[in-house]
């Protein structure tokens, strides 16, 4: 008995150990050291640059050769202008000036067959150049895909004062009013520089090479941006970067110097992108460091990540010779994955190993001395001024990323083919004989899986690890999923969520990996040039220093940061915007507005707009509120707490800059109580790749939309309108287009009742509901952005938020989507595209005693110049995702986005219209929403549903009109005028 | 002699005030005064910006005679929700507390934490778990599951359609109803002296049922009352559920409109604070009344 018990216990223990062992055993990988990446073979498409490079191996290695092209030889195309040297701002020869769409063409005679890079003297003078792009053709065609989007790197220079301290450059950042350093803004370097042509996303760390045989070639360079000036162009062969040994031999006399030179990373000479930002690292060892204020003392890792982001520093060296180069960095974005940088001294990468140097993962500050194994590299610096450049490179991840992209494209092609066969049918009980139509299906799936597995093994080789890295696990999911699908290819139509659709599909895993692996984030605090790396202080402060600092900080935190101003000339402004925006606004005001007018402005962050209402009850209202919702000024106006802006001189000048329709919500009776500050817009977003596959045109009327739906449904796709959002409350913002386009209005002319029962309104309501009841649009879509990326909603109407999201966070469909105006209704005089364009507002309060000053401030803020500067500064400081869609249309016209997109947005804003405000109007909004829900979800009859809505809405309108004294016992006693697009002009004049 | 007693008396009086004082001060400042302010505001027309004007009982008259939304949707919804979630949740918490009390110590603690946690994480869970579960497109978990089983042909609008919203609110409400009351009840059950049960078994008690009805419940009446009051208050105060699930206030066609939502609707959307105050006073009275009833059932008689 006892024995059996013991045996059972032992057996159980063994089983447990085996199971636990299995759980804890780490996934071993057999790493692969070299890998070329998978290039898809497609007869219809251009080859990729990698394929192109593999093509002409014979001609590549050839002695140096150069061919000069000057402006005189160029054929000018489109609007390109020829500028004489005297007007070139310092160039020694005549130049060419190109705007968007302009091109220059050269007939180049080549005598030596070779691979040439294109070098040019360029100067950028446009103001929307975040990343200037060019298309380069040879003989009228793009030799490879990347040639469509190329770039001569641009340089941004921080706008700061500098001084020399200990021979090195120190930058003096401007403090804000509390003494904290302000992020410096950057300016495009407009002077002439010599640049080499790269692919615009810097997938390839080397400049693009064009293979030119003996003979005459037609080279055309087309600018995709405004304000580009080009001087000489040189076609030249680039010598290979030498190996380390050769490099050492080329400096035979140099010796290792013992000087210690320390550079602060935050004092950047220039950078490739204003998005590279500085921040205040609180660690005691990060310098400069202050106790009471925040000093900018390091480069933020999250902003120095995209390939091609480049930073240059000045280095002053007293003794020429060799130095060891060490970097104090932090790199924690991807666990156990290295970030790569190329390092150049005086513009040249000294030897091959520095073309892509790996900085291993490190969650805290760490010093890395550039070395080979334990042997630190010797790097030569000349005496005097040197520059040091570090560029983020994708490095060895490129073949992997190319594989992912190719496989994703293949997957997407196959999924469209499958959809064509199945018609997007989602019936799981139906069996398909896919292999009859695609006999090689299984082989294709397995092929991709094998390719991805090779990339997976190579990925571990790059990280020098034989244990699975967590960041690469999605890749493993992707290829195991593909392999599982290959088991039963006929079942693929029912398994599309594992294949190409949705967040767990193989293609989505790959898309996410592209995003995460192409980001080479790294923060930098210091750079050291030393003779002995042991001279470098520790990367981390000692425990004692840290404790002392923490204690002192704690006590300083009791001190109040005060800012003294004269109350009589200070206006209080509450702003409902992010902290970063407010800091910048304050800085602009202090620098520009206060000196000019003598009016001080005190901005305060208002996290919750209801504070305004409570402040009123407590009698501590500000003079001005900014960033409030479009509804707020009206709510205060009907309760006599807002200021009518029409009484001020200069009112007309301010409002003339806005879209007329955007003013409607701010009208009450005779007055206008708010100015629009930012401007949203609703436009059509569409996937160009899928539209061309479907052979569909972007619809511009609702009839075309409904016609298109049958086609989309055949492929299991659909069309998105904001009515389909998951929010069950259908606000005026989403219902306005249907009503206004049909000539309907929400209220009767006197505002005392609703006009929901007019014929036009019923037409609008019919359209709004039939899209769902008849045409089967999706009723509830929580996230259009994701569906758009997956391709299940390849077209739809959405707003500025989606625009920024797609621009910044949808790398896998980059260049594959466009925008077009909102669909409209065909009327006698053309297509009527009315759509809402919600604005946020600025307003003034009746309780203020400084109304004149407040108005002066508002009119300054809304000026085109101020708005333009703010829009560009906010991006220059915080990066391109901080887009400021100003309601000042002239300022909006200078927003640095694709000019085609800007045109669409401005065109749509010509059709901007907002629902007017009426006391109790929210009930009309609510009843429309309820009626829509009843009709769509409960199959209610339209007319009876509207009848009910009208009854309810009118009751509330009467109640509210009575409350505000426009009605008594149901009889109007005072006129109320509802503003519309037709009569809005009478409010746009100053009160006389 | 007398002098001594009086000092002792007065010093003990002082001690009493020292101990009770902070509570009384806070209670007066934050509860009594705000209730009084609400009562006062309910007699005015206050648009939250201009100074309130006195209108007498007009708000109450309007509420009872003219507010069709209140009578047609809000009141029935609130009572319905409170009845099912309140009573159901109450019975459920007693049952769970009792079941847990039967388990060994460690397991009990772990399970108690598991059951208690939803009531703490309500807000977050709502956004993350429930809306994802009931999401109205094909990617919603429930919809996806039902679609894959072939039980439905197209996604059901769980969170938008009035037919489902209330049911889902009740489900979520029940899920989160194991709050403080549940812990109190568990403590009550654990506190009962084991000897009482033994004595009862000797006296002829036959099964667990009799144990519950004749010993457990009578012995833990104070905790039962506490649990009941907590449940009543929390169910009547519930308002966020419907709004968070459907993403809007008012909820679609008022299907999930509870009294708290109605108060917010009037107070912060229509800016009629006076009326909103009147509704909240009614809510207060309703909670008081029902707590009274509960007390009558559960309070110790002596």
Image (spheres, rainbow, N blue to C red):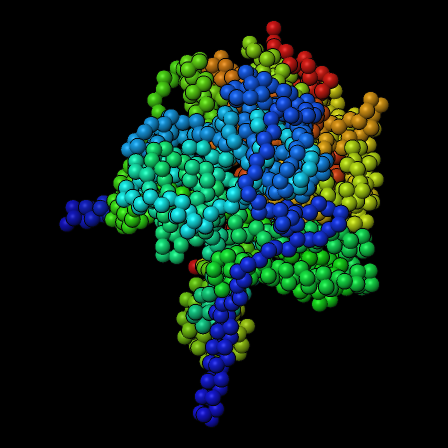
Residue A746 against residue A11 in the figure, above or below: above
Q: Is residue A283 left or right of residue A70?
A: left
The part of the image, by quadrant, that contains residue A73 is top right
Q: Is residue B93 left or right of residue B190?
A: right
Residue A973 against residue A399 in the figure, above or below: above
Q: Residue at x 50, y 20 (%)?
A: A90
Q: Residue at x 45, y 88 (%)?
A: A6
State the residue in front, A770 or A224. A224
Figure disc tally: 0
Q: Is residue A151 left or right of residue A304?
A: right
| Residue A512 seen by the camera | no
Q: Is residue A467 left or right of residue B12?
A: right
State the residue in front, B276 or B157. B157
The part of the image, by quadrant, that contains residue A439 is bottom right
| Residue B190 seen by the camera | yes
Q: Picture coordinates of residue A125 (x, y %)?
A: 55, 24
State the residue lying farthest toward the left.
B1
Q: Picture coordinates of residue A921 (x, y %)?
A: 67, 28
Q: Picture coordinates of residue A772 (x, y %)?
A: 78, 43
State the residue in front, A954 or A232. A232
Q: Residue at x 74, y 54 (%)?
A: A414
Q: Residue at x 61, y 6 (%)?
A: A992
Q: Picture coordinates of residue A100 (x, y %)?
A: 65, 27
The part of the image, by quadrant, that contains residue A68 is top right
State the residue lying farthest toward the top.
A992
């Amino acid at each position: 008995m006892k024995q059996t018990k013991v045996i059972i216990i032992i057996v159980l223990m063994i089983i447990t150990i085996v199971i636990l062992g299995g759980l804890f055993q780490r996934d071993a990988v057999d790493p692969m050291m070299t890998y070329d990446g998978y290039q898809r073979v497609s007869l219809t498409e251009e080859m990729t640059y990698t394929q192109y490079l593999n093509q002409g191996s014979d001609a590549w290695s050839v002695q140096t050769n150069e061919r000069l092209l000057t402006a005189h030889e160029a054929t000018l195309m489109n609007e390109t202008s020829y500028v004489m040297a005297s007007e070139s701002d310092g160039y020694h020869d005549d130049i060419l000036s190109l705007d968007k769409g302009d091109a220059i063409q050269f007939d180049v005679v080549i005598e030596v067959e070779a691979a040439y890079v294109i070098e040019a003297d360029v100067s950028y003078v446009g103001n929307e150049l975040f990343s200037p792009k060019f298309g380069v053709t040879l003989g009228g065609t793009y030799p490879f895909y990347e040639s469509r989007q190329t770039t001569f790197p641009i340089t941004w220079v921080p706008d700061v004062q500098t001084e020399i301290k200990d021979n090195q450059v120190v930058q003096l950042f401007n403090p804000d009013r509390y003494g904290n350093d302000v992020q410096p803004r950057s300016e495009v370097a407009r002077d002439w520089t010599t640049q080499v042509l790269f692919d615009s996303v810097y997938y390839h760390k080397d400049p693009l090479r064009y293979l030119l045989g003996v003979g005459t070639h037609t080279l055309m360079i087309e600018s995709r941006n405004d304000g580009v000036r080009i001087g000489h162009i040189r076609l030249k062969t680039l010598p290979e970067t030498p190996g380390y040994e050769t490099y050492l031999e080329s400096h035979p006399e140099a010796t290792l110097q013992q000087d210690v030179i320390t550079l602060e990373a935050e004092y950047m000479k220039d950078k490739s992108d204003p998005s590279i930002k500085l921040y205040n690292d609180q660690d005691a060892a990060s310098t400069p460091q202050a106790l009471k204020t925040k000093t900018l003392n390091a480069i933020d890792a999250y902003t120095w990540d995209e390939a091609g982001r480049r930073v240059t520093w000045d280095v002053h060296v007293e003794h020429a010779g060799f130095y060891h180069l060490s970097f104090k960095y932090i790199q924690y974005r991807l666990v156990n994955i290295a970030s790569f940088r190329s390092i150049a001294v005086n513009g040249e990468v000294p030897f091959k190993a520095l073309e892509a140097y790996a900085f291993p993962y490190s969650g805290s500050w760490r010093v890395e001395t550039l070395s080979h194994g334990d042997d630190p590299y010797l790097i030569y610096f000349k005496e005097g001024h040197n520059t040091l450049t570090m560029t983020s490179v994708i490095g060895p991840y490129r073949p992997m990323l190319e594989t992912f992209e190719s496989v994703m494209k293949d997957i997407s092609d196959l999924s469209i083919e499958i959809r064509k066969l199945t018609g997007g049918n989602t019936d799981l009980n139906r069996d398909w004989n896919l292999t009859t139509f695609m006999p090689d299906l299984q082989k294709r799936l397995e092929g991709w899986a094998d390719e991805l597995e090779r990339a997976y093994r190579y990925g571990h080789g790059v990280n020098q690890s034989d244990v699975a890295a967590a960041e690469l696990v999605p890749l493993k999911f992707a290829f195991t999923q593909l392999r599982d699908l290959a088991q039963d290819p006929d079942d693929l139509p029912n398994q599309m969520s594992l294949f190409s659709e949705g967040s767990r599909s193989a293609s989505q895993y790959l898309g996410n990996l592209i995003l995460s692996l192409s980001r080479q984030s790294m923060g930098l605090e210091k750079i050291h040039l030393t003779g002995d790396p042991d001279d470098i202080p520790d990367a981390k402060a000692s425990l004692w220093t840290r404790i002392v600092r923490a204690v002192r900080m704690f006590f300083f935190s009791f001190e109040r940061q005060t800012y003294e101003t004269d109350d009589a000339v200070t206006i209080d402004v509450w702003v409902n915007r992010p902290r970063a925006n407010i800091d910048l606004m304050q800085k602009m005001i202090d620098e520009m507005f206060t000196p000019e007018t003598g009016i001080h402005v005190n901005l305060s962050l208002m996290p919750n707009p209801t504070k305004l209402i409570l402040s009123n009850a407590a009698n501590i209202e500000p003079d001005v509120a900014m960033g409030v919702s479009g509804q707020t000024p009206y709510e205060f106006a009907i309760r006599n707490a807002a200021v009518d802006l029409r009484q001020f001189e200069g009112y007309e000048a301010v409002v003339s800059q806005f879209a007329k329709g955007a003013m409607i919500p701010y009208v009450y009776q005779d007055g206008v109580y708010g100015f629009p500050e930012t401007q949203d817009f609703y436009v059509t977003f569409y996937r160009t790749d899928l539209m061309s596959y479907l052979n569909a045109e972007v619809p511009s009327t609702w009839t075309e939309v409904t016609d298109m739906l049958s086609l989309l449904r055949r492929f299991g796709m659909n069309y998105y309108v904001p009515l389909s959002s998951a929010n069950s409350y259908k606000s005026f913002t989403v219902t306005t287009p249907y009503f206004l386009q049909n000539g309907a209005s929400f209220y009767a002319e006197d505002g005392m009742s609703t006009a929901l029962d007019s014929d036009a309104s019923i037409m609008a309501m019919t359209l709004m509901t039939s899209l769902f009841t008849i045409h089967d649009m999706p009723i509830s879509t929580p996230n259009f952005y994701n569906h758009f990326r997956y391709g299940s909603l390849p077209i739809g109407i959405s707003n500025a938020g989606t625009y920024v999201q797609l621009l910044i966070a949808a790398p896998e469909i980059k260049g594959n989507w466009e925008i077009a105006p909102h669909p409209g209704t065909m009327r006698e005089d053309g297509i009527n595209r009315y759509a809402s364009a919600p604005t946020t507002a600025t307003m003034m309060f009746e309780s203020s005693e400084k109304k004149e000053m407040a108005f002066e401030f508002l009119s300054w803020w809304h000026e085109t110049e101020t708005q333009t500067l703010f829009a560009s500064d906010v991006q220059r400081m915080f990066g391109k995702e901080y887009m400021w869609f100003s309601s000042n249309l002239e300022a909006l016209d200078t927003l640095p986005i694709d000019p085609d997109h800007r045109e669409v947005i401005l065109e749509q804003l010509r059709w901007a219209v907002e629902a007017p405000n009426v006391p109790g109007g929210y009930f009309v909004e609510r009843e429309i929403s309820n009626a829509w829900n009843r009709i769509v979800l409960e199959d209610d009859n339209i007319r009876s549903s509207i009848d009910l809505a009208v009854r309810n809405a009118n009751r509330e309108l009467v109640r509210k009109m009575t409350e505000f004294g426009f009605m008594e016992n149901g009889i109007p006693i005072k006129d109320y005028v509802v503003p519309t697009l037709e009569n809005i002009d009478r409010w746009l004049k100053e009160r006389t | 002699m007398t002098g001594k007693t009086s000092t002792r008396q007065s010093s003990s009086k002082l001690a009493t005030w020292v101990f009770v004082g902070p509570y009384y001060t806070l209670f007066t400042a934050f509860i009594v005064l705000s209730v009084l302010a609400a009562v006062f505001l309910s007699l005015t027309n206050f648009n939250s910006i201009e100074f309130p004007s006195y209108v007498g009982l007009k708000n109450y008259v309007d509420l009872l005679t003219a507010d069709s939304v209140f009578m047609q949707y809000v009141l029935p919804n609130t009572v319905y929700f409170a009845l099912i979630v309140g009573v159901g949740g109450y019975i459920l918490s007693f049952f769970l507390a009792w079941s847990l009390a039967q388990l060994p110590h460690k397991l009990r603690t772990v399970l108690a934490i598991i059951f208690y946690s939803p009531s703490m994480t309500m807000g977050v869970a709502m956004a993350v778990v429930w809306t994802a579960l009931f999401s109205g497109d094909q990617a919603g978990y429930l919809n996806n599951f039902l679609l894959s089983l072939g039980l439905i042909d197209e996604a059901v609008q769980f969170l938008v359609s009035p037919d489902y919203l209330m049911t889902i609110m009740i489900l979520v409400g029940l899920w989160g109803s194991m709050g403080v009351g549940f812990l109190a009840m568990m403590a009550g059950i654990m506190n009962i002296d084991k000897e009482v049960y033994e004595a009862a078994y000797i006296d002829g008690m036959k099964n667990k049922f009799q144990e519950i009805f004749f010993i457990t419940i009578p012995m833990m009446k104070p905790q039962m009352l506490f649990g009941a009051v907590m449940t009543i208050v929390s169910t009547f105060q519930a308002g966020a559920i419907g709004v968070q699930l459907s993403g809007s206030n008012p909820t679609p066609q008022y299907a999930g409109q509870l009294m708290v939502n109605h108060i917010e609707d009037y107070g912060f959307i229509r800016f009629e604070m006076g009326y909103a105050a009147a509704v909240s006073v009614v809510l207060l009275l309703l909670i008081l009344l029902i707590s009274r009833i509960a007390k009558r059932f559960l309070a110790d008689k002596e």
